[in-house]
Image: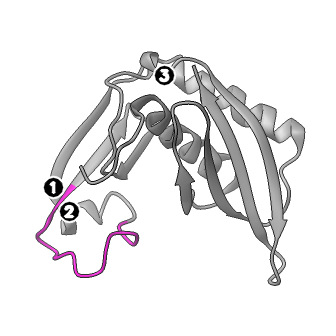
């Protein structure tokens, strides 16, 4: 693996991403910084997140963590992976027959990923959404930053 990841935080990021996509129809985070102590994810988002929405995101992420889902990985050709997940963020020049690592978090999330993960969501602990802020852009949308911890 070319990057170091905290397995708990990285797996929590997968669940947070799927929760954001499911709740708001936004894309997965376009930028993240994952540390054992505190992490952040940035989303292209149309508006600020309300405190009530943030609490609901936290509740739903913890609900998924408490399902004690297995976390698994498999390798498959890029062409097969493209039928299951968004491969647009792969580096340019990755051949159609190149092997891509696909990570599944139970039946909740699936994506291409190079990071380290826990074996089961029971290893994550409690997810806490620490803070959120919104930076508007000139196009009427902006960037929503979510900071979180898992312990």
In-image side of 9 versus 149 (left or right): left
Q: Which mark is residue 80?
A: 2
* Local SS, label 3: loop
In-image side of 125 versus 112 (left or right): right
Span highlighted in magenta in the image: 87-100
Q: Is residue 99 magenta?
A: yes
Residue 108 pos. (x, y %): 46, 36
Residue 15 pos. (x, y %): 52, 38
User: Quick one: label 3, few (<14), some, or many (20+) residues within 10 Å?
Assistant: many
Query: Nearest the camera: 84 or 77?
Result: 77
Q: Which mark is residue 90?
A: none
User: Quick one: label 1, few (<14), some, or many (20+) residues within 10 Å?
Assistant: some
Q: Which mark is residue 76?
A: 1
- Of the two numbered discs 3 and 1 in the rendering, the one whose residue sits closer to the viewer: 3
* Local SS, label 2: helix
Q: Where 150 falls versus 66 (above or below)?
A: below
Where is mark 3, residue-wise?
124
């Amino acid at each position: 693996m070319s990057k170091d990841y905290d397995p708990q935080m990285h797996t929590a990021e997968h669940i947070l991403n799927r929760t954001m996509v499911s709740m708001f129809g936004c894309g997965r985070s376009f930028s993240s910084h994952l540390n054992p102590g505190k992490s952040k994810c940035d989303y292209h988002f149309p508006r600020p997140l309300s405190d009530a929405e943030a609490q609901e995101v936290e509740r739903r992420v913890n609900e998924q963590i408490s399902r004690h889902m297995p976390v698994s990985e498999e390798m498959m050709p890029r062409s097969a992976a493209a039928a299951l997940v968004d491969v647009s963020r792969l580096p340019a020049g990755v051949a159609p027959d190149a092997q891509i690592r696909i990570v599944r978090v139970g039946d909740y999330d699936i994506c291409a990923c190079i990071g380290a993960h826990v074996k089961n969501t029971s290893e994550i602990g409690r997810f806490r959404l620490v803070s959120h802020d919104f930076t508007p852009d000139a196009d009427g949308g902006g960037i929503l930053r979510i900071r979180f911890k898992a312990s």
